[in-house]
Amino acid sequence: MRRLVILVVFAAVATTALALASAMAAPDPAPAVEQIGDVQTVTPSEVEGKPNDVGDLVGRLHPALVHFPIAWLVGLAIIDFFGLVRRREEWQRAGIFVLAGTVLSLLPTAATGLLRAAHMPSDAATHALLVTHRALNFAVAGLVLAAFALRLWRRNSLAGRWRISYLVLLFAATGLVLVAADFGGRMVYGPDYLPW
Ligand code: HEM
């Protein structure tokens, strides 16, 4: 169990570091050629709108998968509110399983997102949305993994400051995933799709 906790803590730190690094060190995608128009190299199958290779095909599953971590996380926040804030024991037990489901749902979603990113238009507006979307989602994954590590480590004694720390991680991740999803939606439907 101790090794598992260390592994999850390591994964949480690594994802948070990735989120920070991708937000800070994103290369400026605006090559000189963009000044005369958005020029992009495309393959014949891309022209037809078909997947280019297996990575492209798998990446196209991202829009189908994104609903899962959002729904798991919002569900978890509700369940843990009743379990850990209102202290209902049966909800606390359910929360552990829903937390595991949340962690599992993040993995394919993040992986397909990374694959999909390689095939997105390279104009500056899309790139800016993509970098923010990616950084926020890595941060969400880091927060969820940290909450998971805390819950594994404390097992049945998630009380006092540990309970508060867990809830802060969880509610921060839930709020952040909604903001991150908004950036994802704007990439697909346009930056002005919603009025904010
Ligand atoms: C892991 C949690 C993630 C969630 C919950 C999430 C959520 C979303 C949502 C809601 C959309 C809009 C989909 C639509 O309306 O059709 C989207 C699109 C997108 N996301 Fe994510 N995303 C996640 C991770 C990532 C990561 C790590 C990347 C990597 C850069 C990424 C890249 C993209 C791309 C490229 C799109 C546009 C898809 C397209 O136009 O086909 N996502 N995401």
Image (cartoon, rainbow, N blue to C red):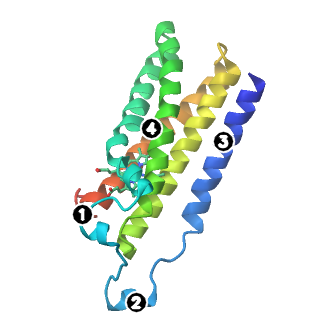
Query: Counting other residues with Cα less than 10 Å from the Cα at mark 1, is it few (<14), some (14-19), or many (20 or more)?
Result: few
Given the image, on which type of amino acid does mark 4 rest?
Thr
Given the image, on which type of amino acid does mark 1 rest?
Asp
Q: Nearer the viewer, mark 1 or mark 2?
A: 2
Q: Quadrant of the N terminus?
A: top right
Q: What secondary structure is marked by label 2?
A: helix
The residue identified by callout 4 is: 174
Given contact means CB atoms under 8 Å apart, are the residues at marks 3 and 1 in contact?
A: no
Residue at horizontal 43%, vertical 60%? 117
Residue at horizontal 61%, vertical 48%? 15
Front-most of 33 and 28?
Answer: 33
Q: In this view, does 26 lie above or below 188?
A: below
Give the label on residue 33, or none.
Answer: 2
Given the image, on which type of amino acid does mark 3 rest?
Ala
The mark nearer the N terminus, 3 or 1, is 3
The mark nearer the N terminus, 1 or 2, is 2
The residue identified by callout 1 is: 192
